[in-house]
Image (cartoon, rainbow, N blue to C red):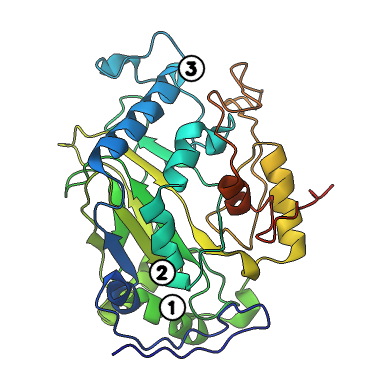
Amino acid sequence: MTTLTETATSTGQPDVATVKATFGDWRDDLDRNGYAIIKGAIPLDRAVDYQKQAFDWLSSFSSDFSFEDRSTWTAANLPVQNKINTFTAYSVCHEKFMWDARLEPAVVDAFATLWGTSDLIVSFDAPNITLPNRPDKPKVGAWPHVDQSPFRRGRVCVQGLINLSHSGPEDGGLMVYPGSHNLTEEFFDTQTSKSDWTRNDIYLFSKDELAWFESKGAKPHKICAEPGDLLVWDSRTVHYGAEPGPESNTIRTVIYASYAPAAWASEETLREKAKIWRHWGGTTHWPHDNVVFRDTRARLADGSLDPRNRSQPRVMPDISDRLLKLAGARRYDGTEVEPAE
């Protein structure tokens, strides 16, 4: 038997998630642990093809780059990448393979099942392509965080990761602190001062702060997954992207994609998303709020514009009605959204 209770705002968005349910599927894992794995959300052959397209995109920036020759894995041969191995510039968020993956039926259906509606919008999020043990790039240590401000309460954002590569214990992947989503509000209320809170939807934890979570039983766990799996997690769950171990030869390949009911987005947010869409820009992990415009421009280490910069996707997406509605550029009543100035 399934029971569901929650308080909600006038837009239908949960204000404080008091969900008490037994679904008999991955949603129970999400409620209990703060994360879940939807196995085989994308058929293996299509997942392999999406990775190939991602590799084609990566190798398009230099004829000197080769996946088979580690000596070519250098910044000079690669597009500009942030320290956590994601790519946000060059209009990559709107490459055809990115949108095709976002539109995968079982991926969309998972979030439709979660939120109880198929009228969804999606984040313009990034791909992560991590070349293991690059000789020219220092490894990034653990950076445990949550992607939800302490001013927000309850489950208001669930993040998604479309996995396109094997992720074993030694490979790069998602680290989570199971159960921490049920502890973060207590942490902020008892271990921090409200005067120090910000509206920014990110909070990085110190070692001492993590010790508090571990004392409550929330300890780090590496999620293992296969190509085609969809990983979802509550934005209150402490997590971070783990670097490949020294024995790993796997090129981690994932696409971040988060979905939420379109009804949760304000008119202002929809107009901003429509503007970002028009300019082929990226956003945060949040699909319906906290929409920060990440433009297409790639900056080199000296601050200059990368001459290889792209102001539109290398391979344009197929622009369908479904895509435009997920992008937030077209409402579900069929009317177009006027982009913000």
Looking at the rendered structure, the secondary structure element under dot 2 is helix
- Kind of residue indicated by mark 3: Phe
Q: Is residue 78 above or below residue 292?
A: above
Residue lying at 43% horizontally and 78% vertically, measured from the top left: 184
- Residue 338 position, x and y percent, is 80, 50
Residue denoted by label 2 = 113
Label 3 to label 2: alpha-carbon separation: 39 Å
Q: Is residue 69 above or below residue 166?
A: above
Residue denoted by label 3 = 61
Q: Is residue 279 above or below residue 241?
A: above
- Kind of residue indicated by mark 1: Thr
- Kind of residue indicated by mark 2: Thr
For this rendering, which residue is in front, 270 or 318?
Answer: 318
**Dot 1 or dot 3, earlier in sequence:** 3
Asked which quadrant contains residue 289, the reply is bottom right
- Residue 123 position, x and y percent, is 55, 52
- Please state which of the two labelled residues, at mark 2 or mark 1, is closer to the viewer: 2
Residue denoted by label 1 = 184
Asked which quadrant contains residue 296, the reply is top right
Residue lying at 45% horizontally and 85% vertically, measured from the top left: 186
Residue lying at 41% horizontally and 47% vertically, measured from the top left: 104
Label 1 to label 3: alpha-carbon separation: 42 Å
